[in-house]
Image (cartoon, rainbow, N blue to C red):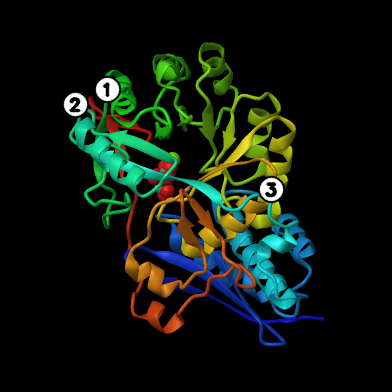
Amino acid sequence: MLKIVSARVIVTCPGRNFVTLKIETSDGLTGVGDATLNGRELSVASYLTDHVIPCLIGRDAHAIEETWQYLYRGAYWRRGPVTMSAIAAVDMALWDIKAKAAGLPLYQLLGGRCRDGAMVYAHANGATIEETIEQAQSYLALGYKAIRLQSGVPGLKSTYGVSKTRLFYEPADAVLPTENVWSSEKYLRSVPDLFKAARNALGWDIHLLHDIHHRLTPIEAGRLGKDLEPYRPFWLEDAVPAENQANFRLIRQHTTTPLAVGEIFNSIWDCKQLIEEQLIDYIRATVVHAGGITHLRRIAALADLYNVRTGCHGATDLSPVCMSAALHFDVSIPNFGIQEYMHHTKETDAVFPHAYTYRGGALHPGEAPGLGVEIDEKLAAQYPYKRAFLPVNRLEDGSMFNW
Ligand code: GCO
Ligand code: MG
């Protein structure tokens, strides 16, 4: 038996916070798993250290499904982002170990490749439409086949998705939550202009995406979807908050613009109705927040029955460990759609040396055994945890809104 002999949590902040689980086995093989929950990092670190690791010692590292069930059913308190991120980290680390033991890149154990690489979308954003388009043009020059467009909204000081830096967007930026102000009316007037200008400047051979970040009502989202139809967006993401899955019925009645949702989902139950009623086109659940490779494969298999494709969340708060896992998953499932990709800082890339590479609009997981990613613990120790919150959002009258 390949026994788990030790496990530890490593918290590091090479530009932003990451929580990583490292598991060691009796024959010296190690595996890593991402457990980062943006803005609530230490809760998952504690969940793992205080409540999961003691139960892992002595278990069979090969028994991935058994361990998943043990941690899910055995917790009694099922689901939720903290629990499911912790389970995900264990699951990723065990898949890493199993694939290393086999001497194969993980995708081979998941059934082998269905495609060469995972088409990714880049992030173009700017304070103005012109700036956003200029950034999109630089991604076109790098060979990207899909680009997400986010732009400042006239009349609003700041908004979701528009960054101070190029290439990536880092919203968890302060030791107490930054306050933003929002107006759906102003926003709704601005987005069709952005897409019209983008199609004029960028043409039609590029997929264009947009993230609403949970801010509309279903009827508003239906109208925006309709307004954007002439510009053929690849998807509209997180149109409305999705606690009430039935909200999407109303959007669907009004537009044929494809819909994506699910980056904050953590289990198959969060997306069951959306998938079964074909209320969405892309499911964005990802490895770290949705229970690991084991559970995400189950979600993808359900989605495949209903013509729903995947579009995993891949913002900077998902570490290179999660990105590696996502890429092995992406190339091995039949109903892959697209993968989000935002560059990490060079400090982060140095802490997490990885085998995946960008080529021709796609990320490729590489051929290294396992996940193809490690954590440099000495380097990680040089970047201690720094508290950082996501922003909060208020309407113009001061009342709390969704960020
Ligand atoms: C995205 C997301 C991110 C999230 C962030 C929160 O589509 O990439 O919406 O920007 O806001 O990952 O942790
Ligand atoms: Mg999003």
Camera-side mark, 3 or 1: 3
Q: Nearer the viewer, residue 292 or 182?
A: 292
- Name the residue at the bottom extreme: 27
The percent coordinates of residue 294 (x first, y second) are: 70, 55
Q: Which residue is mark 3?
A: 333
- Type of amino acid under label 1: Ser
Residue found at x 48% / y 62%: 357
Q: Which residue is mark 2?
A: 154
Residue found at x 31% / y 28%: 198
Reply above or below: 88 against 254. below
Q: Nearer the viewer, residue 198 or 50?
A: 198
Q: Which residue is mark 1?
A: 190
- Type of amino acid under label 3: Ile
Q: Quadrant of the N terminus?
A: bottom right
Tell me how far mark 3 sits from mark 1, CA to CA.
37 Å
Circles 1 and 2, Cβ within 8 Å, touching? The answer is: yes
Q: Nearer the viewer, residue 380 or 118?
A: 118
Camera-side mark, 2 or 3: 3
The percent coordinates of residue 360 (x first, y second) are: 46, 51
